[in-house]
Amino acid sequence: MQDLTGSRGHFEPALEAAYQADLATQKIVAFHRTALLCAVLYSCFAVLDLMAVPSNVAAAWAIRAVVLCVTAATSLASRLSRETFVRRYAMLTCLTYLMWGLGIEAIIMFTRPDDPGWSTYYAGLLLVSMALYGATYLRVLHASLTGLALTLSYLALALGYQHMGERGDWVILVQNCFFLIGANFIGLFSLHMREHFSRQAFLLKNALKRDLELEEEAKRQSEHLSEHDALTGLPNRVRFLRRLGELLSQRDDGSTVAVLFLDLDDFKPVNDRHGHAAGDYVLRRVADRVRGAIRASDLAGRLGGDEFVVALPLAVGQAELTIERLSAALRAAIGEPIAFGGEVVRVTASVGAARCPDHGQTAEELLHAADQCMYRSKRRKETALAA
């Protein structure tokens, strides 16, 4: 399995792009769920404002309303423009979390020193930090900068606006900052571990996908080889007979299926004189010429040795003429000279034909009838040559 590359734990550019694309849906779903959770918590904590911010409940509720409206608008925009959201995910997510944290700090600003929320509402920043590191797919750098911004803004609020240092509330300030900083460190650690495992899971998924693709490809190749001739690529006897059976089953009263059986003449001398490499080359060229002579709707195959076969669906009234023309075309094409190793090799073909239903009803019967017809043609040719 491929390992992570680079000191920062990122993949190579192409793999990194694939990883980020794989996370696109998860990013959107996580953002929507977190936005909903934020809306629920922001709404629920409005009840606490009656006790924690009694001096300015209206301002606190106004801030909560603004945060809820902006959150809803951002969530809706991410649904309407998924590509833009995913492309700007880091920026939009960081800004959203900053808004949630700054909303809490804004409520603290409108809280009087004698209100409970003055020193306790900072805990809302802990909730934001937990969501920042646990419910986003930000990189460590982006998340840590966002968490640091929230912590520094709280520190500035405590010192610059609440004057906690001047009031002697150092213990509370130090405790609050300790918890905020601690929450960020724990969040960063968990984010780093989750990122590591997420990338490892992506690699495992890719490796499994490749293995399945290779297995499927090997299965297809195995099936192809089991039904095709390895030398010529034509269907072998098993596949040819099955496809011929399918053609016969599709035949209606106005059509027929013909089978042409081809056997090469003078092929043995090619092997004897020029070697088996020449014989294999001749067979491949013959297969190409058979393919070139037939129609797209016809079926060609190699039964083995120097025997080839063709099946063709025909209209009943055109069968005889088409069979004669194709037989002549096949003999002419196969009889063309073949150049091999600086020499010219010639072979001819004997052709026998049979058609359904005159010579058989099944694929085997038609093949046998065409074979017998071919042998009769070959014997006539040999007799003519001997005479």
Image (tube, grey):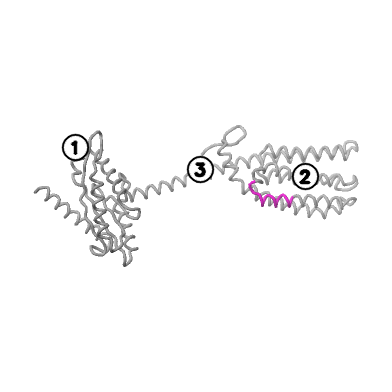
List the single residue furthest toward the left. 387
Which residue carries the number 2 mark? 101
Q: Residue at x 23, y 49 (%)?
A: 331
Q: Which badge, 1 or 3, is on the more N-terminal residue?
A: 3
Image location (x, y in percent) of residue 361: 27, 64
Per the picture, the main secondary structure of the magenta-coloured stretch is: helix
Q: Residue at x 74, y 50 (%)?
A: 71
Which residue carries the number 3 mark? 207
Instruction: Give the CA distance from mark 3 to mark 2.
Output: 40 Å
Image location (x, y in percent) of residue 114: 91, 46
Pointer 2 local density, CA inside 10 Å: few below 14, some 14–19, many at least 20: many
Which residue carries the number 1 mark? 273
Which amino acid, mark 3?
Ala
Image location (x, y in percent) of residue 380: 14, 53
Give the residues drawn in magenta, as a range. Answer: 71-83
Which amino acid, mark 1?
Arg
Say what secondary structure mark 2 lies in: helix
Pointer 1 local density, CA inside 10 Å: few below 14, some 14–19, many at least 20: few
Say what secondary structure mark 1 lies in: helix
Closer to the camera in the image, 138 or 381: 381
Mark 2 or 1: in front is 1
Please say if the residues under marks 3 and 2 sit with CB atoms less than 8 Å apart. Answer: no
